[in-house]
Amino acid sequence: SQTIHQWPATLVQPVGSPLSLECTVEGTSNPNLYWYRQAAGRGLQLLFYSVGIGQISSEVPQNLSASRPQDRQFILSSKKLLLSDSGFYLCAWSVGSGADTQYFGPGTRLTVL
Amino acid sequence: AQSVTQLDSQVPVFEEAPVELRCNYSSSVSVYLFWYVQYPNQGLQLLLKYLSGSTLVKGINGFEAEFNKSQTSFHLRKPSVHISDTAEYFCAVSGQGGSNYKLTFGKGTLLTVNP
């Protein structure tokens, strides 16, 4: 069966520090991978998605970047965190296009102070 | 492009009462529709989805939703809720056709079931 891992589960970082969040998927090949941010009262905002190694689409101009160094690994990064980067970050995967279910990881709670 | 409106940000109900969570969407193309549930501090889990065919879709945990194309709605219902249904519920839409890999989510409805 397929599983998705995210770490760390929680993170408290000072403003201006770097960020690296990791997501890995097991049990499937060539998944589509997604990073979402969830802020209170604002639903889920799609940040990045990837349909293959090295292929990254950015949805929202911002202080973050994403990379996919391996087929089932998706990394969210920042060089300098802002207060507004605080939120709950969710990674998800799917296989195929729009009709297919997206499966979500447990999330990372990021607090920037 | 698609958009989703969840009309109620919070819905409080008593245990064993029926509930309806409302969702309307906007799209220039045909769509697929989804409902996801999120329990506190967890990821999202699929409740049900509409792809084609029967407009009444049954999902897990006794939930169902009805696709209404003329009203561009996809409301979620359950005839009798339990305390354990307390969670946030998200409606989402994906456009059909082409290489469309993206879901657009509503802002969520917090369902609170009280004893």
Image (cartoon, rainbow, N blue to C red):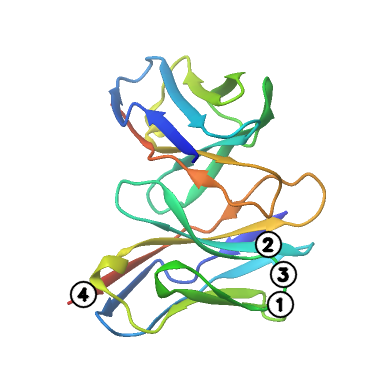
Q: Position of residue B60 (x, y in %)?
A: 45, 67
- Gap in Å between the C-alphas at discs 3 and 2? 8 Å
Task: Determine whether label 1 and label 4 are within 8 Å by CB.
Answer: no
Give the residue at mark 2: B32
Report crowding for label 2: few under 14, some 14 to 19, many 20 or more residues within 10 A (C-alpha): some
Q: Nearer the viewer, residue B1 or A34?
A: A34
Chain name for mark 2: B
- The type of residue carrying mark 2 is Tyr
Q: Amino acid at mark 1?
A: Lys
Q: Nearer the viewer, mark 3 or mark 1?
A: 3
The residue tagged 1 is B69
- Residue at 68%, 19% (x, y): give it: A54
In three-dimensional space, the C-alpha distance between marks 2 and 4, rounded to whole angstroms, equals: 32 Å
Examine the rendered structure and indicate whether residue B35 appears above or below residue A13. Answer: below
Q: Residue at x 40, y 31 (%)?
A: A6
Percent position of residue B25, x then y = 63, 67
Q: Earlier in the sequence, mark 4 or mark 3?
A: 3
Give the image quarter of residue B94.
bottom right
Point out which mark residue B52 bears: 3
Distance from disc 2 to disc 1, alpha carbons, whole Å, reads 11 Å
